[in-house]
Amino acid sequence: MVKYMKKLRLFSLAWPIFIETALFMLLGFVDVFVLSRYNDLAASAVNTANQAVSIVTIVFTVISGASAVMISQYLGAKKNENASRIAAISIVFNLVAGVVISVLLALFSEEILVFIGAEGTLLGFASEYLKIVGGFLFLQAVLASMSVIIRNHGLTHISMYVTVGMNIINTVLDVVFVLGLFGAPKMGVMGVAVATTFSRIVGTIVLGAVLFTKVESVKIFELLKPFPWGDIKNIFKIGVPSALESFLYNLSQLVITSMVLNFLTNEELIARTYVQNITMIFYIFAVAIAQASQIITGHLVGAGEMDKAYKSGMRAYKYSMIITVVACTVGVLLRKPIVDIFTDDPTVIVLGAGILLIDWFLELGRTTNIVVIACLRGAGDVYFPTICAIFSMWLVSVLGAYIFAVVLQMGIYGLWIALALDEILRGVLMVWRFKGGKWRTKAIVKS
């Protein structure tokens, strides 16, 4: 069924993923930036609504994340039909789950946001956004599956091109609809929601066309008869622990967001929103290298090349750490001018600049986690990162955030210290695990 395959190299895979990831993050960055010109609370509202979206999209990662591992290992073992069957499962499952979640978000957006802690004007803005973006979230589910399939065949540049197009559409429509240019109505938050949704519609259509003409055939869905229960078992064996780790992270961030909304000032909330968008720039390099490294690790483990997989993973970690340190250092040196891009409120600028100093240390831990966990996942070692996440995220991140930010009254700075300690602790544990070599026995596919 596979129509195309190419030789995999770290940077040839990573640079399109980097651009795609940067542009994908830019979608949210542009939304917040344009809304900051409209209303500061509107910008924070979209950020708050996206916390809820992040929680429910974990369902999609159960399948797409596990599919990434299994497709890469099957291709490495030269079992192409098996890889095609996993691709079909991924698309069907995510489409069905996406439709169900979209309906729930559209119907219960306000109740979900109230649960998080949103109220007043913030609640109104966030609910308006979540009804539209959440109602069409199934598009993101299908996009995630198709992107995973294409990437693991080595065609990382294709999903990059699609994301470029989505960004152009989103940016143009953001400016037009939010600010009411060229005679368009001034729609505010609703304008951002419409722009985001329309760009995803276009992206889904284009990526689907590419997938079924260059990579796979529509006949892959015939491989689901008889239904492959054995593959489903393996997918959930890999996907549930990996998704649980992401779920715990996003849930911890949701709890912390509720804490922020209830105990910190509006200026601290706004500063947090802007800094979160700024720091995306610091770790997108690590995300790109990690995703490329996971693909390579999966292929090598599927082929039985364990030593090469280890060397490849450590090389990826070294490169990502060097890049992150440089990026974060530049960010610290230019911290006030960077925050000033978003706002002219002197209090928010001072708070944001202070947070960026602490964030330098946080990013070292985050980079380690992103890259090393990706390598462990590529090898099929998914339980250890999840166990570490259960303890560290809740005992260090959430409890620490409450102690530092609320009890010790360190405010937003205390919150960031807790987040940094969590990332660093888990980072140390992940490196220890990868060097220990237990992942060598966790492969799902045997060559």
Image (tube, rainbow, N blue to C red):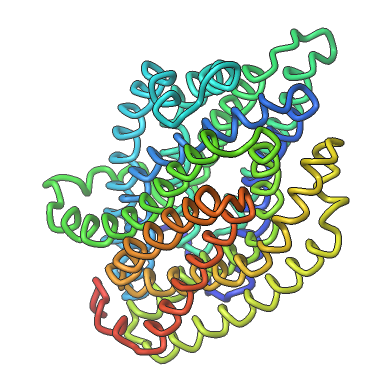
Q: Quadrant of residue 395?
A: bottom left
- From this view, report whether residue 43 is shown above or below residue 25: above
Residue at 72% of width from left, 28% of height from top?
40
Relative to the observer, which residue lies in front, 101 or 144? 101
Residue at 59% of width from left, 25% of height from top?
198
Relative to the observer, which residue lies in front, 427 or 301? 427
Relative to the observer, which residue lies in front, 232 or 363? 363
Relative to the observer, which residue lies in front, 108 or 67? 108
184 horizontally vs 202: left or right: right
47 horizontally vs 85: left or right: right
In x, y percent, where is residue 85? 27, 53
| Quarter placement of the C terminus | bottom left
| Quarter placement of the N terminus | bottom left
In x, y percent, where is residue 242? 33, 59
118 horizontally vs 195: left or right: left
In x, y percent, where is residue 434? 40, 83
Q: Quadrant of residue 432?
A: bottom left
